[in-house]
Image (cartoon, rainbow, N blue to C red):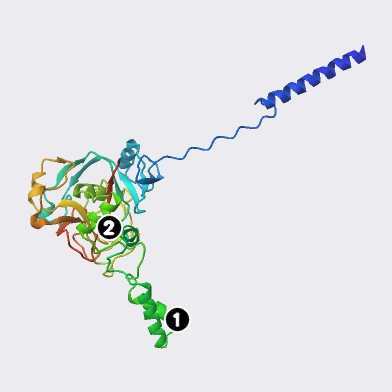
Amino acid sequence: MINSVRNTVLMLVGVLMVAGLFGANQGGTASAKPMPKPAPAATASPLSWAEVLQQNPDPKVVTNADFLKRIRETKLPWRVKDKASGMEMLLVPPGKLVMGMSPGDTEAHDGEKPAHEVTITKAFYLGRTEVTQVQWVKVMGETPSQFKISSESRDTKIAQYMQEGLTKQEAQEKAGAESPNKLFAATNPVEKVSWDDCQKFCAKTGMKLPTEAQWEYACRAGVDKATYGERDQIAWYSKNSDSATHPVAKKAPNALGFYDMIGNVWEWTNDWYEEVGYYKSCADGVVDPTGPAQGEFGDRVLRGGGWDGNTLCRASGRVNGAPGTHCANIGCRFARSAD
């Protein structure tokens, strides 16, 4: 009897062990290992011309809560890289702005009046910085910029100073101190580019110059003051530039994450220039304006001010230039449609 009971117990234990092993192999809890989760699929870009760098806006960069909300609502990638030029671009959502003279702006000119409401109905992308020399060279093959000096020229100066008795280190320091902002840098903005030159760049890349309204909308980023911060903090201009351009993105950005919208170099827009009449015609408000049908003197609009400017370095500051103008204080920033 005892042996019979013992045999029965051993049989039951064996059955339970087999059942436990079988359950574990079938995903049971006895000794089951969690199944590895499949790797998330890569985010495909809905934009044929761009590589997506960041889908959702960073609240530390887009500091305007309303813009942050509207960027998310578009469902479009926020931060992208243009494949043709390598430049980083940020999404600007649809919205409204009061364009022209800011309230209480004593530096505003007649060409900035009257202030008027503008509605932007379509999202667009805009260069996070002014076009740099290296980006221009990548597309166009060379830079027309004034603020550069070849490494050969610098080496020649160093050799000359060493012949005069300086050590190599002393010669290098002296050569650098003579023209610290003129040494070629990949991140210095390209300048001496005309509006016509910009059209050639656009033909190669599929980009376009922003309209004047798009430019001011992106520059203000929800701010109704003349500048989106103190000039010394946000811009290279006549009082701090040492009469030269500086590498982009060294000053504080605006609430959308754009750098150097004010100062460093003037930026071409696509619009024809008309000093007073066109703004007066917009007094009751306009939707997606593209400027007058033709311009005074055949000129185009320039925005943002440059390294040699002061009172024109404001969100509404605007001047005119012939499409073929090449100046060392004029550069560009490009836009793209969000489709």
Name the residue: 69% across, 26% down: 24
Q: Does residue 333 appear in this view?
A: no
Q: 179 or 141, which lies in front? A: 141
**Image quadrant occupied by the C terminus:** top left
Name the residue: 8% across, 47% down: 280
* Crowdedness near tag 2: few (<14), some (14–19) or many (≥20) residues, C-alpha within 10 Å: few
Please tell me whether mark 2 or mark 1 is closer to you in this view: 1
**Helix, strand or loop under label 2:** loop
**Helix, strand or loop under label 1:** helix
Give the residue at mark 2.
230
Name the residue: 35% across, 68% down: 184
Name the residue: 35% across, 36% down: 75
Vertical arrangement, residue 330 with respect to residue 32, above or below: below
Residue 65, horizontal then vertical, whole percent: 33, 41
Rendered image quadrant of residue 161: bottom left
Residue 323, horizontal then vertical, whole percent: 16, 58
Q: Is residue 21 left or right of residue 302?
A: right
In the rendering, which numbered label is found on residue 168? 1
**Image quadrant occupied by the N terminus:** top right
Q: Does residue 319 appear in this view?
A: yes
Vertical arrangement, residue 165 with respect to residue 107, above or below: below
Residue 37, horizontal then vertical, whole percent: 56, 34
Q: Label 2 sits on what residue type?
A: Glu
Q: Label 1 sits on what residue type?
A: Lys
